Amino acid sequence: MRTRVVLMLILVLLTPMASASEVGFNREESLSAEALNIQAGEVSPSGSNLLLVGDDGFVHMISASAPGDRSQDQDIDSQRSARFNDVAWHPNGETALIAGDLGAALRYTMSDNSIQALKGAGILGSIELTAASWRAGGDLAFFGAKNGNVYSFNEGEGMMQMENTLSSEITDVACHLEQNICLFTTLDDGIAVIDRTREVTWIDGTSGDTWVAVDCADPLYRKCAAFASGRRHVSVVLDIEDASKSTSGEVMQLVQGSSDFVSVSRGYDGTSLVHLAPMESVRYQLDADEVFMHIESEAITSYDADVAGQRIALMWETGEDDGWFVTNEGSIVEIYPTETRESLGIMETIIFAAVAISVPGVIIGLIFMNSPYLQRKYRQLRGFERKE
C-alpha cells in the first residue's frame, strides 16, 4: 500500500500542468465596410497568400503575412451569386478548388484571377458541396456534399461520384500531407477513410458522434484527428498499406471552454487550431492527442466585444500563438504571445523548484523502502544492530 501511494505521488509530480494559452490581440483594418459572411479560407502552399470564400459568390485574396494591408488585396469576380463553402489549394499553389451551393465545383487560377467550372461538374445539378481537399500527390481531389455524396476529381476524368457513401452531410474532408489517404467526417454516419484506389471504408465506433471537422496536421505521424459536437475529439491511426484497416482511438472530451467545436484551421508546427462557436479556440497536438485552450471567450470579449460576437472563419500562424484570425464579417485580428507567458512568475518558480527537489528524494525513498539490504546497512551504520 505504501509503495502504491508513493508511485501515485511521483506520477502527480511528473504530470505536466496544462493551462490556457495567454495571447494578446491587435485589431487590423477590416476587409470591408459592407456586410460579409465569409465561410472558409486557406493559406497558399507558399504561405504568401490567403484565399477567402463566402456568401454571394465572394472570393477574395489577401496577404498572409500582412493581412491588414488593404493595398495588397485582390477582389476576384466569380460571376456567381451562390454561397461558397470551402476552398482547397492545389499543392503546386497555382490553382485552388472552390466548393459551394447550387453544384458549384470551381477552379480558381492564380495567373489570371479567373474562375471556371470543373470538367464534369454538370453531374452535380444543384447539389450543395460542403468541403474540398486535394490529396498529397495533387493528382486527385475530393468534394463532399450535403446529401452525403462524395465526388472525386481529376482533369482527365472530371467529377465522378464515389461508391459506399451514405446519406448524412459531409462536414469536412482532409488528406494526409504525405500519403495519398484521405478522411471525411459526417454529421450522423461517422468517419470514413478513402484509400489510394478511391475505395471508401467506414471506421468502426465513430457513428455515435456528430463530427464537424477533421485535420491531418503533421506529416510525421500517420494519423489524423477528428472533432465532434460536445467538444469531443478522436485520433485516427492510418494503415498505410491497407487504409481499410485504419482505426480510431478512444474518443476524448475537452472539459475546458464554454462553447462547441465548429471547424478547424491548420496551426503552427503540426498542430490544429479548432474553432469553437462563437469565439473561442483550442490547440490540438497530434503526437500526444491533447487539447489546450488557445483563445478564451472572456479574453477576446474584454479586448473587443464587437469581434467577440462574430465567428472565426480562419486562423493561421507564423509561430506558436503568433499569427492572425479573420472572422465571418471580415474583421482581422493579430494574435501574439503575451510577455507574462514568456517567463515564469514567482509562484510558478516556487512550484517548479519544489518539484525539482522533491521528485529525486521521493524516488530515492521509494528505492530504500523496498530494499531490505539498504535498510539493514542503514541500521548497521547507525549502530542499531551489529554486523554479522
Image (cartoon, rainbow, N blue to C red):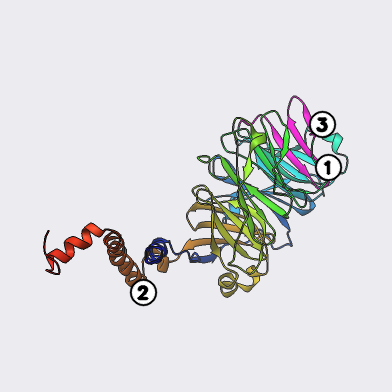
Q: Secondary structure at mark 1?
A: loop
162 falls in the magenta region:
yes
Between residue 196 and residue 82, name the one nearer to us: 196
Q: Earlier in the sequence, mark 2 or mark 3?
A: 3
Give the alpha-carbon distance from disc 2 to disc 1, as whole Å.
58 Å
Q: Give the amino acid type for the residue marked by disc 1 in the picture.
A: Gly
Say how many tags the image has: 3
As drawn, the label of residue 347 is 2
Q: Secondary structure at mark 3?
A: loop
Asked if the residues shown at circle 2 and circle 3 are in contact, with their CB atoms under 8 angstroms apart, the answer is no
Q: Give the amino acid type for the residue marked by disc 3 in the picture.
A: Gly
Q: Earlier in the sequence, mark 1 or mark 3?
A: 1
Vertical order, 226 against 333 (above or below): above
Q: Earlier in the sequence, mark 2 or mark 1?
A: 1
Question: Crowding at label 3, few (<14), some or many (≥20) Cα neighbours within 10 Å?
Answer: some
Asked if the residues shown at circle 2 and circle 1 are in contact, with their CB atoms under 8 angstroms apart, the answer is no
Magenta span covers which residues? 137-163
Q: Give the amino acid type for the residue marked by disc 2 in the picture.
A: Met
Q: Residue at x 87, y 43 (%)?
A: 126
Q: Residue at x 47, y 55 (%)?
A: 320
Q: In the image, residue 299 lies at what x, y percent?
A: 55, 71
Report which residue position mark 1 lands on: 103
Quadrant of the image containing the C terminus? bottom left
Give the alpha-carbon distance from disc 2 to disc 3, as whole Å.
64 Å
Residue furthest toward the front? 388
Question: Crowding at label 1, few (<14), some or many (≥20) Cα neighbours within 10 Å?
Answer: some
Q: Residue at x 36, y 68 (%)?
A: 344
Can residue 190 be seen from the camera position used here?
A: yes
Between residue 99 and residue 368, name the one nearer to us: 368
Report which residue position mark 3 lands on: 120
